[in-house]
Image (tube, coloured by chain):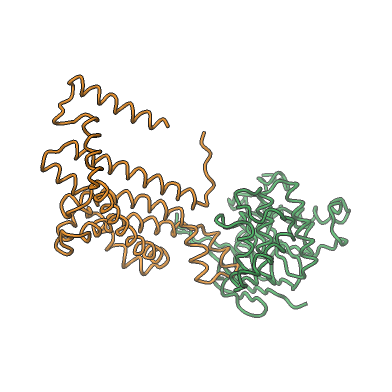
Chain colours: A orange, B green
């Protein structure tokens, strides 16, 4: 609620500053112009087409990352040998920013369709998920392991009833971080390696100097990111077995 | 009677990573634990009581010597020799019933039967109505009741208890002591209790194994020949008082040796059960 007040306050003062002539409308168009661009993009339906294209890429990249990163994280955490082989390779790949993969992605997947941007999203989402799963499983308390073993748990129960639930709060946090990274990267990838999506929409309008439409795309990215983050925070609360800390 | 555990000249050391010194926890310990008895292991801090219990549980292996369970070497943990932990060790992501169902699931009881069986054990420890609460919603005493129910659900031959009441207030502690005794006399299982609380050990056990200061060895084994059944008023029985003062003296000797060796005496911290003069 208080957040909404600050948003309204910013918009009102921004509009006022524009009307008073303090802002160059060419460099920073007033909210009214941006709003007009919104209705324009929305009426033609193109805004939703681009939004859907970006979302689809993020979701496919994120799901692939989840399928790859969670099992790898569990494996690396539970076997010293796998850890020794895997970690150095991953730690070398991790510092490469997802957008530095764009040239290769274009080469491999082409600029048409979703392949290249989905791949970039996969790269961005993989590492936070892997690292959170890994440290989640590594942080199992000794007493829980001992308890499980003295209660007769075999390998399957150690994994499914102890390691994974114990790591679940970490994994959901990893998912949230990954989603944020993936969302940022998909836009960056679409600026260069796509013919649809919000990133492409921004780039296209920039080339035509339609700054209100550029900002319309930016605001859509921000708002969508906010909604996704909020949804996953709810998920985090739902799946955390840790008692919620009382707020003061 | 046939011993359920036999230890012969068991040695166990730990490496202290801080200064590379190896710490001798047990130095040639030998003992026998009889089938179906209630026995306590008592000793000063650092006498290796918990190390011994973890060896019996199979969490640790001896460096040398022999440790037999029913005639066979202990090779790892088993639900036949289950453990009740001081810090409960409940899985916080499972409800009380889910925790009690864990060992049932481990021995492949079908999901449909598990719940009813778990509720039986929960009822045994008087937690009816709390089956669907998570550990963080329960008090310390209730958590330990879940811990007891979960251990019993293993249908173990031996119940190993590592200071199970240490984190509880006095009233809860006494209630649980009586509860455990009631369960023990009804079940015919072997109970091994590690404690540094002398009165608790005398009240609950039929035998007490008193350990020496580090490196731990058996100093003496005392039969507790008190009238049955044990009720709270036995603590004023002349024989109880006599045993207590005799064991206090013996234990104090070991605590004083520990202090001389620079090992922190936990008995001093424990609300004056035994006072050690420097």
Instruction: Describe residue B205's horizontal placement relative to residue A133 as left or right.
Output: right
Image quarter (top left, top right, bottom left or bottom right) of the N terminus of chain B: bottom right
Q: Is residue B178 visible?
A: yes
Return the residue found at the far left.
Answer: A208
Question: Residue A71: image x %, image y %?
Answer: 39, 65
Residue B171, position as x, y percentages in the image = 75, 47
Residue nearer the viewer, B120 or B70: B120
In the rendered image of this protein, does residue B231 appear above or below residue A72?
Answer: above
Q: Of B250 and B37, which appears nearest the observer? A: B37
State the image coordinates of residue A230 (x, y, percent, origin top left).
Answer: 40, 44
Please report the residue visible at 17 percent of the width from the left and 54 percent of the height from the top. A195
Q: Is residue B268 above or below residue B31?
A: above
- Left or right for A230, reference A20: right
Q: Residue furthest top?
A: A20
Q: Which residue corresponds to the image point at 54% horizontal and 47% vertical from the top-left?
A: A243
The mark tally for this picture is 0
- Residue A94, given in percent of the width and then of the height, sits at 26, 56
Quadrant of the rendered structure where residue A22 is? top left
Task: Name the quadrant of the C terminus of chain B.
Answer: top right
């Amino acid at each position: 609620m208080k957040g909404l007040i600050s948003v309204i306050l910013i918009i009102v003062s921004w509009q006022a500053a524009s009307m008073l002539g303090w802002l160059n409308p060419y460099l920073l168009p007033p909210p009214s112009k941006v709003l007009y661009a919104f209705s324009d993009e929305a009426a033609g339906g193109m805004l939703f087409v681009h939004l859907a294209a970006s979302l689809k890429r993020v979701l496919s990249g994120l799901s692939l990352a989840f399928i790859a990163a969670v099992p790898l994280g569990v494996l690396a955490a539970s076997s010293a040998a796998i850890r020794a082989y895997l970690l150095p390779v991953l730690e070398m790949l991790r510092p490469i920013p997802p957008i530095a993969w764009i040239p290769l992605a274009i080469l491999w997947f082409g600029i048409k369709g979703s392949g290249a941007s989905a791949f970039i999203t996969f790269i961005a989402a993989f590492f936070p998920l892997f690292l959170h799963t890994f440290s989640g499983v590594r942080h199992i308390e000794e007493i829980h392991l001992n308890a499980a073993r003295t209660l007769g748990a075999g390998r399957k129960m150690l994994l499914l009833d102890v390691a994974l639930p114990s790591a679940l709060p970490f994994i959901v946090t990893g998912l949230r971080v990954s989603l944020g990274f993936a969302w940022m990267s998909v836009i960056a990838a679409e600026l260069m390696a796509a013919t649809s999506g919000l990133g492409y929409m921004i780039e296209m309008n920039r080339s035509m100097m339609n700054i209100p439409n550029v900002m319309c795309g930016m605001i859509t990215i921000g708002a969508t990111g906010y909604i996704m983050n909020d949804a996953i925070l709810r998920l985090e609360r739902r799946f955390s077995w840790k008692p919620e800390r009382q707020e003061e | 009677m046939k011993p359920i555990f036999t230890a012969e000249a068991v040695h166990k050391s730990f490496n202290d990573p801080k200064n590379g010194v190896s710490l001798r926890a047990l130095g040639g310990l030998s003992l026998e634990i009889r089938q179906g008895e209630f026995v306590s292991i008592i000793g000063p801090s650092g006498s290796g009581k918990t190390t011994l219990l973890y060896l019996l549980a199979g969490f640790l292996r001896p460096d040398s010597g022999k440790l037999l369970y029913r005639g066979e070497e202990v090779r790892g943990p088993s639900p036949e020799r289950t453990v009740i932990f001081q810090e409960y060790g409940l899985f916080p992501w499972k409800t009380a019933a889910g925790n009690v169902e864990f060992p049932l699931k481990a021995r492949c009881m079908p999901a449909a039967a598990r719940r009813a069986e778990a509720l039986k054990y929960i009822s045994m420890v008087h937690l009816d109505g709390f089956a669907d609460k998570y550990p963080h919603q329960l008090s310390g005493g209730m958590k330990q009741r879940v811990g007891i129910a979960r251990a019993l659900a293993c249908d173990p031959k031996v119940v190993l208890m590592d200071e199970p009441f240490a984190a509880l207030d006095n009233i809860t502690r006494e209630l649980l002591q009586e509860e455990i005794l009631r369960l023990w006399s009804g079940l015919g299982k072997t109970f091994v209790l590690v404690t540094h609380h002398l009165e608790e050990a005398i009240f609950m056990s039929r035998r007490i194994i008193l350990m020496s200061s580090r490196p731990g060895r058996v100093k003496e084994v005392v039969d507790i020949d008190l009238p049955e059944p044990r009720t709270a008023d036995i603590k004023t029985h002349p024989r109880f008082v006599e045993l207590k003062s005799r064991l206090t003296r013996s234990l104090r000797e070991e605590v004083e040796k520990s202090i001389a060796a620079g090992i922190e005496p936990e008995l001093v911290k424990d609300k004056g059960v035994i006072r050690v003069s420097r």
